[in-house]
Amino acid sequence: MPISPGPFTGRTITGLAQDLRAGRTTATELVMQALDAVTKLDPQLNAFVTVDHDGALAAARRADHELAAGTDRGPLHGVPVGVKDLIDVAGLPATMGSRHYAGHVPAADAACVIRLRRAGAIVVGKTTTHEFAYGPTGDRSANGPSRNPHDPERMTGGSSGGSAAAVAAGMVPLALGTDTGGSVRIPAALCGIAGFKPAYGAISADGVFPLSRTFDHVGVLAGDVRDCLPAYRALTESQLREDVSGARMAWLDPAGLNPAGLIQVDQRVTDLVRTASGARDEVRLPAEVVTALRETYLVIQSCEAAAVHAARLARAPELFGPELLERLRVAAELPGWRYVQAMDGRARLAASVGALFERHDVIALPTVPITAPPLQEPETEPDGEPGAWRGTVRATLLSMTSLWNVVGLPALTVPAGTVDGLPVGLQLVCRPGRELLLFEAAAHLPEKAPSTPGPAAP
Amino acid sequence: MPISPGPFTGRTITGLAQDLRAGRTTATELVMQALDAVTKLDPQLNAFVTVDHDGALAAARRADHELAAGTDRGPLHGVPVGVKDLIDVAGLPATMGSRHYAGHVPAADAACVIRLRRAGAIVVGKTTTHEFAYGPTGDRSANGPSRNPHDPERMTGGSSGGSAAAVAAGMVPLALGTDTGGSVRIPAALCGIAGFKPAYGAISADGVFPLSRTFDHVGVLAGDVRDCLPAYRALTESQLREDVSGARMAWLDPAGLNPAGLIQVDQRVTDLVRTASGARDEVRLPAEVVTALRETYLVIQSCEAAAVHAARLARAPELFGPELLERLRVAAELPGWRYVQAMDGRARLAASVGALFERHDVIALPTVPITAPPLQEPETEPDGEPGAWRGTVRATLLSMTSLWNVVGLPALTVPAGTVDGLPVGLQLVCRPGRELLLFEAAAHLPEKAPSTPGPAAP
């Protein structure tokens, strides 16, 4: 059964900004609403690891004083945000979703948090992450699984599952996440909100615990897609090309992203998303390019993650969850020559993917080709093959998103309707520098597609 | 017994250039002298894999016509050169020292060969390389071992062993080599000539068969150190800082580069080289930095070499020599996370090595801490440990040179005298951009140090 809407459900950052400046609300009131909602809703959703009650209220009072004194930091001024527990916030625990970091309190803010605070945003707390962000399901964490507001017995997706649940339940209007293979976009799509993964490097990852440095991105999650842009502007130093308009969109069919047949694709999801996109043209990626993108993602991510965790793997393997431990042990065995070959092939892959944009600015496809799976599916298949089901779910969840991390392209997910009452996301992808086209395309989608029958979304 | 001097022994490129322009010789005469010397001396030295008799003579005639017509391409105009058989020369076989490339004839010149020809140099032939350049001994090659002109029963060192032997025997005044861990400098030192490995990337490696892309450098070998500079200028697009003088030199003791005690160091070599350098100050590298440099070199080179050869290793392992096959199989097992960690550590290592140059411009040390070992030492030690002796020789030969490849610094070797009649090299290292200081330091060394007793060098 879906969770009741929270105080920020249906409210945009732009609307909050107007209310604040018109004196219809205060930052203190917004933060108190957020804190109350967390108290009320979080026991069912487990979106937060740490809530900074006192710090958030103090920051809200400062924000109110600043506004009253005429200092206006822009659209995020006074807005409560959640920050994924993989991102350092000075003085708050940062667990990385792992028992290895129990009790760890960083002394300094991550670069993206510094920028967020400079823009006037108020950190309400730290959100649940999949253990070390190494998984798209969001249900393996020292903090326990985050739960989907549309059905708490289902996954949020991950790894930024807490950020997605917090926004989707209306506890906060905005949250920070990280995205190495889809970790912003997957939970945003499965929880029915918007999520934006910028171009590689567009938001600094300093102070963010690494998963796979080559693919790690910081991104934003918001209830309304229009809120992703001001949040992104506050977080990046990249210049946006403002002189763009008239995005030419093409559809990339999920069937073409499944050359090995290992991915589940729900045709109802595909049909709903295609209708929602309004795309008439169609483009294709050659099967060998898709296969190479998947191999490149797997090899580079595995080797880089194993490098991050090598010392912990040797010193205290028992502190990892069993699923992650097994995956890291496999990753640690991958030979270096495969990493070298994968890195060498990236320029060629970027050129192959770039060909998609020869006659189009924005590529549309499902963010995830299924709806949110149930939580805590067994680790063993009925036929006894260990972890096969989970392996398939992981591969399916990542199948439409990780491609774009390999080549570092900006990608946005927007809610596209529901199937069986569960949210579905439309993913829009562009070239670096064309982000405004992406947001323009998202703003001019056809009227919301009819959802397939099922319980109503909140 | 040393080989008799060849036609270019004791002659500099500058001298040849003057002779050519004064009409005292012609390019055709120089090339014929080179070809005659190869015919006479190469059966004892095995420096050449392929000799391009007709092509070289035709190029020499063109060079003579150009000079007669007033087209002067500069100091290399009309000068015969040898090119390592790892570097593509259009229309000539390029064996890479391997049976895998028997009969392989590239259609185009490597970038460095294009530049060499533009500067008027004449390619006489291709010189023996250690199999795929993967070894500093120069005695494992499909073409058989190259032999040291100072004692043909001894190694040239490698992998550019043929280039070193060809120049040291006076068959050509100049040769191209490649240097991934010392492959220009080691054979130059052991054969008693000069060799220069520029800064990483200063000479294009396009058209050069890779060993380990991160560390691969193209370099030059010449009988006289003063000839390395005009050759380098012809091959690079890097700008040299001309406004430098008064190099401050410091000594880096070989004992400090042997923290694990696995390297043979001949104290007579050390003493001779230190005297030859005239260095009074001394600098040190912390033992942990030396250890990290060696680990970084081993891991990165192994993974990159295994990536280059993965397909051959799977398809036709029997075409590798047994020593290389075994080394590649070990290299192919190295896990990717070690490669990632090694790559991540490079910036820190560069800073540690950079500290050597805080108060000095040029670091002096032996190029190789021993003289040329005998050829074809057994692969098995008396106590039965397979390959231990060879492993030690490899580690010893590389011990003073590979450090500088890891951080990409320019390094020059100059003859420093002899021990037991066998040549010893003084290595001079600088920061990129300070190459002229390096050559200035080499030109202003103290008078030649007295050699220790032994048979006379040629």
Image (cartoon, coloured by chain):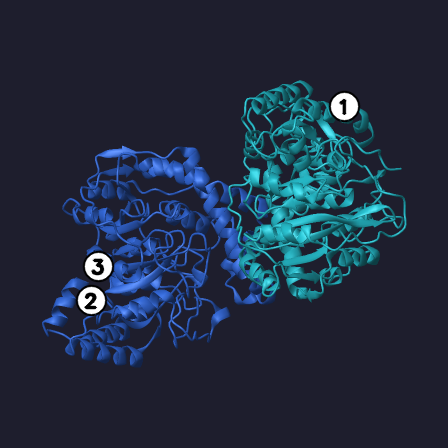
Chain colours: A blue, B cyan
Residue that protrudes farthest toward the front in the picture = B22
Q: How crowded is mark 3: few (under 14 residues within 10 Å), some or many (20 or more)?
A: many
Q: How crowded is mark 1: few (under 14 residues within 10 Å), some or many (20 or more)?
A: some
Label 2 is found on which chain of the structure? A
Q: Residues within 10 Å of mark 2 (few under 14, many from 20)?
A: some
Mark 1 = which residue? B36
Q: What residue type is labelled 1?
A: Asp
Mark 3 = which residue? A227
Quadrant placement of the N terminus of chain B:
top right
- In the displayed structure image, the side of residue B159 where residue A394 appears, left or right: left
Q: How far apart are marks 2 and 1 (CA)?
A: 81 Å
Find numbered disc 2 in the image and state the secondary structure of the residue it sits on: loop
Residue at 84 percent of width and 56 percent of height: B268
Q: Position of residue B419 (x, y in %)?
A: 85, 50
Q: Distance between the residues labelled 2 and 3?
A: 13 Å
Q: Is residue B323 above or below residue B353?
A: above
Q: Which of marks 2 and 3 is in front?
A: 2
Find numbered disc 3 in the image and state the secondary structure of the residue it sits on: helix
Q: Can residue B83 be seen in this view?
A: no
Residue at 42 percent of width and 50 percent of height: A394
Q: Can residue A295 be seen in this view?
A: yes
Find numbered disc 1 in the image and state the secondary structure of the residue it sits on: helix
Nearest the viewer among B130 and A194 is B130
| Mark 3 in CB contact with mark 1 (< 8 angstroms) | no
Say which quarter of the image contains residue B19.
top right
Q: Which amino acid does label 2 sit on?
A: Gly
Say which quarter of the image contains residue A244.
top left
Q: Nearer the viewer, mark 2 or mark 1?
A: 1
Question: Looking at the rendered structure, which numbered label has been put on residue B361?
Answer: none
Question: Looking at the rendered structure, which numbered label has been put on residue A74?
Answer: 2
Q: Position of residue A114 (x, y in %)?
A: 33, 69
| Mark 2 in CB contact with mark 3 (< 8 angstroms) | no
